[in-house]
Image: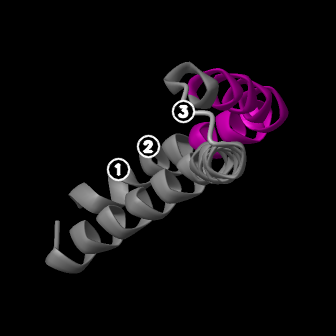
Amino acid sequence: MSDTAIIDIALQTMLVALKLSAPILVTALVIGFAVSLFQSLTQIQEVTLAFVPKLVGVGIALLLCGNWMMHTLVTFTNNLFDAIPSLLG
């Protein structure tokens, strides 16, 4: 196995990880920003107020994007398993 093949696999792995984590992270970021803005405007400093909306938003993001995420991960894994013979020989 050559160095370029290892680097290519590592790059593909990082891109898949980025694509899979993006919907959840962006959802949590947007909701966290909105709740922080609301808390600063109303001067309500309750810790649990930020947690519950993020939990609900991430759950909804998983429901909406879960099928796509699973399909992306299975496709990547199948492509990786299909490439094993060419990497060894």
Mark 1 sits on what residue? Answer: 84
Dot 1: element? helix
Q: Residues within 10 Å of mark 2 (few under 14, many from 20)?
A: few
> What is the C-alpha distance between the residues marked 2 and 3?
50 Å
For the point 17% across and 65% down, the residue is: 1
For the point 66% across and 33% down, the residue is: 70
Q: Amino acid at mark 2?
A: Phe
Q: Are marks 3 and 1 in contact (CB under 8 Å)?
A: no
> What is the C-alpha distance between the residues marked 3 and 1?
54 Å
Q: Which sits in the foreground, 64 or 13?
A: 64
Q: Quadrant of the C terminus?
A: bottom left
Q: Position of residue 23 (x, y in %)?
A: 67, 49
Q: Are marks 2 and 3 in contact (CB under 8 Å)?
A: no
Dot 2: element? helix
The boundaries of the magenta stretch are 51-75
Mark 2 sits on what residue? Answer: 81
Q: Which sits in the foreground, 35 or 27?
A: 35
> What is the C-alpha distance between the residues marked 2 and 1?
5 Å
For the point 39% across and 60% down, the residue is: 14
Counting residues from the start of the chain, the first of labels 3 and 1 encountered is 3
User: In terms of image quadrants, where is residue 45?
Assistant: top right
Q: How many marks?
A: 3
Mark 3 sits on what residue? Answer: 45
Q: Amino acid at mark 1?
A: Ile
Q: Position of residue 85 (x, y in %)?
A: 34, 52
For the point 63% across and 53% down, the residue is: 33
